[in-house]
């Protein structure tokens, strides 16, 4: 795909706000735009459809289309009508045109399709029709693809590109990934690994990443298959959560095949260290007496465990007494950021006297 000049990037949550407004068809208007969201592999583009469903509710049918896997007969077929001596078009059930509800259609990997199929998808994007059948009024269509510079087979002609709106989706950073991970059951080991190694979620498009061994890099063959992305990190969760069922070699081999050898080696260090980490219950029971871990990575895991384990105001007040004994202000800040960014704990934090006092004493960190 030709290079698109992005001066601005947008987050996945911003896209969930933008797409319905600019893409929905409106009666009497022909000003809808089809958004095309670009990012490097594994950044969460396909999650946009789920976000839209959470935002818009059951007013719509939500339809995911893996465009490269579809051929003409998956979309529509022309069938002879012998009675009228004409041809009728039957549309694939994928598009749910048997009811009048407006549709939200996500065309995934839209620029990796064969040229013949490109005509079909272009008509859907621009004219809001599946074959010859119009989508219900109010329907939303958007596409996703990879950056042209990723080198993974995306191509679009200029005349098509000029008819859509390209967005470059911001790659989740360590903070945003960990906020999401905390809400979605991702191991504290993985979250601690990310918090202590934020460069694992940098982008090759950022400056100064030439020596970053963790991330996708299309100029380095060894980093174009197994690498760390939000998607591949999340896929590590099952092996990490079941670490006691496998040997060290089995764990490292599986992680290396998922996130690359550099990431696997580092993540295994955090797995090994987990057995030395204080339990939250021990800290809450004796916040001013338990030994504060000297290893920064172990401290980080303590913080993420606490975010998952704290349930009551008393738990939080007690743990804050331990926090005040931690000499690393960066670790304190990690805990506070996760505490205020997690739906389950933010209400506790807002009404906790110990947290308020910490904020006053550390306002410069905030």
Image: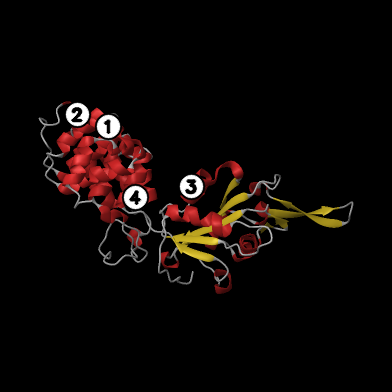
Residue annotated with mark 1: 310
Judging by the rendered image, the residue that carries numbered circle 4 is: 176
Q: CA distance from mark 3 to mark 2?
A: 36 Å
Q: Which numbered dot is residue 51?
A: 3
- Distance CA(mark 4)–CA(mark 1): 21 Å
For image coordinates 50% across by 43% down, the residue present is 54
The part of the image, by quadrant, that contains residue 215 is bottom left
In the rendered image, residue 148, in percent from the top left (x then y), is placed at 45, 67
Identify the residue shown where x is 17% and y is 30%: 283
Specify which label sits upstream in the sequence, 4 or 2: 4
Q: Along the polypeptide, which appears first: circle 3 or circle 2? A: 3
Residue annotated with mark 2? 284
Label 2 Cα crowd, 10 Å radius (few <14 / some 14-19 / many 20+): many
Give the mark nearer the N terminus: 3 vs 4: 3
Q: Earlier in the sequence, mark 2 or mark 1?
A: 2
Earlier sequence position, callout 1 versus callout 3: 3
């Amino acid at each position: 795909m030709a290079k698109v000049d992005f001066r601005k990037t947008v987050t996945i949550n911003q896209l969930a706000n933008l797409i319905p407004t600019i893409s929905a068809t409106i009666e009497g208007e022909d000003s809808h735009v089809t958004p095309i969201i670009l990012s490097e592999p594994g950044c969460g583009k396909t999650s946009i459809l789920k976000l839209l469903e959470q935002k818009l509710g059951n007013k719509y049918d939500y339809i995911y289309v893996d465009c490269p896997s579809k051929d003409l007969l998956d979309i529509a077929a022309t069938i002879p009508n012998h009675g009228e001596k004409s041809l009728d078009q039957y549309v694939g059930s994928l598009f749910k045109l048997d009811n009048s509800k407006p549709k939200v259609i996500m065309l995934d990997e839209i620029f990796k399709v064969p040229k013949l199929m490109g005509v079909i998808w272009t008509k859907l994007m621009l004219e809001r029709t599946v074959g010859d059948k119009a989508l219900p009024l109010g329907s939303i269509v958007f596409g996703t693809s990879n950056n042209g510079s990723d080198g993974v087979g995306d191509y679009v002609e200029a005349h098509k590109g000029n008819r859509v709106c390209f967005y470059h989706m911001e790659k989740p950073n360590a903070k945003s990934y960990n906020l999401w991970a905390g809400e979605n059951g991702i191991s504290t080991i993985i979250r601690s690994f990310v918090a202590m190694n934020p460069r694992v979620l940098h982008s090759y498009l950022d400056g100064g990443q030439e020596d970053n061994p963790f991330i996708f890099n299309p100029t380095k063959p060894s980093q174009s298959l197994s690498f760390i992305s939000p998607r591949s990190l999340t896929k590590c969760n099952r092996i990490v959560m079941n670490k006691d069922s496998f040997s060290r070699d089995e764990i490292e081999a599986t992680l290396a095949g998922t996130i690359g050898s550099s990431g696997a080696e580092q993540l295994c260090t955090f797995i090994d260290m987990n057995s030395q980490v204080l339990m939250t219950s021990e800290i809450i029971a004796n916040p001013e007496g338990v030994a504060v871990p000297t290893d920064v990575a172990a401290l980080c895991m303590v913080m993420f465990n606490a975010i998952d384990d704290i349930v009551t105001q008393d738990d939080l007040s007690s743990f804050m007494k331990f926090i005040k004994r931690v000499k690393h202000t960066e670790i304190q800040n990690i805990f506070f950021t996760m505490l205020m960014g997690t739906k389950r704990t933010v209400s506790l934090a807002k009404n906790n006297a110990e947290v308020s006092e910490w904020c006053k004493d550390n306002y410069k960190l905030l």
